Image (cartoon, helix red, strand yellow):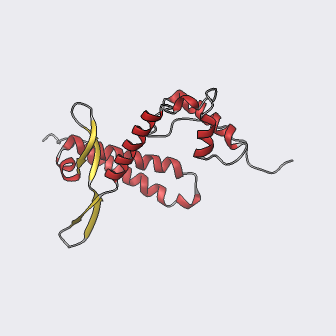
């Protein structure tokens, strides 16, 4: 009898917040498994494989160099915007760093960055930021719940999620008897 890892069935699915279709998870997962069977899975190896027009990864990349360069520079601009914080001082004199700009959608559905104070003064925009924070916490919890080092943190993250969700629920008034 062989002692080893228990048999596990693995199904690929889209990670929370990912910008790919559900059906793509299987295609990408299988392609990554194929690549890792012959060495470490690296971005360079994925790109090298995708350069072959017959690779299942090929269609996920922009091959027009001018468009790809523009997309890359736009991502660099986003990274620059996200890299700036403001430091607020609370009533006790404690300095609290916060992101200066948040990516939110306006009333027309256009995504852009707004200043922190404007976002928090605009309920619809603040709700978007809170929803993103909840999604990130849920993603962290799902990603690390299997690790023993995270066991103590998981209940705390779950409690934080419940608290945020409870705070966002509309309060109903009790009727007088």
Q: Residue furthest bottom?
A: 93
Looking at the rendering, in which quadrant would you find the C terminus? top left
Residue 37 vs 22, above or below: the answer is below
Residue visible at 81% across and 51% down? 3
- Horizontal arrangement in the rendering, residue 158 relative to residue 11 (left or right): left
Q: Residue furthest front?
A: 66
Residue 59 vs 173, above or below: the answer is above
Q: Residue 14: x, y in percent?
A: 51, 36
Quick one: 135 or 76, which is closer to the camera?
76
Quick one: 142 or 44, which is closer to the camera?
44
Q: Residue 133: x, y in percent?
A: 35, 48
Q: Residue 39: x, y in percent?
A: 71, 47
- Horizontal arrangement in the rendering, residue 174 relative to residue 105 (left or right): left
Residue 116 vs 123, above or below: the answer is below
Q: Residue 106: x, y in percent?
A: 23, 36
Residue visible at 32% across and 50% down? 164
Is residue 46 visible in the rendered image? The answer is yes
Is residue 11 visible in the rendered image? The answer is no
The quarter of the displayed image where residue 24 is located: top right
Residue 169 vs 85, above or below: the answer is above
Q: Residue furthest right?
A: 1
Residue visible at 43% across and 46% down? 138
Quick one: 168 or 53, which is closer to the camera?
53
């Amino acid at each position: 009898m062989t002692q080893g890892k228990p048999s596990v069935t693995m199904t690929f699915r889209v990670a929370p917040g990912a910008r790919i279709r559900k059906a793509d998870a299987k295609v990408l997962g299988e392609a990554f498994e194929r690549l890792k069977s012959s060495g470490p899975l690296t971005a360079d190896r994925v790109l090298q494989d995708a350069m072959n027009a017959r690779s299942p990864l090929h269609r996920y990349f922009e091959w027009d160099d001018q468009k790809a360069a523009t997309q890359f520079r736009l991502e660099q601009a986003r990274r620059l915007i996200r890299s700036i914080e403001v430091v607020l001082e609370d009533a006790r004199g404690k300095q609290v760093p916060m992101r200066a700009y948040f990516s939110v959608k306006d009333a027309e559905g256009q995504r852009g960055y707004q200043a922190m104070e404007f976002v928090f003064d605009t309920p619809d925009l603040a709700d978007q930021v809170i929803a993103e924070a909840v999604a990130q916490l849920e993603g962290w919890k799902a990603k690390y719940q299997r690790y023993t080092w995270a066991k103590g943190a998981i209940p705390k993250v779950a409690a934080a999620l419940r608290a945020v969700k409870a705070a966002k629920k509309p309060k109903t008034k009790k009727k007088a008897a």
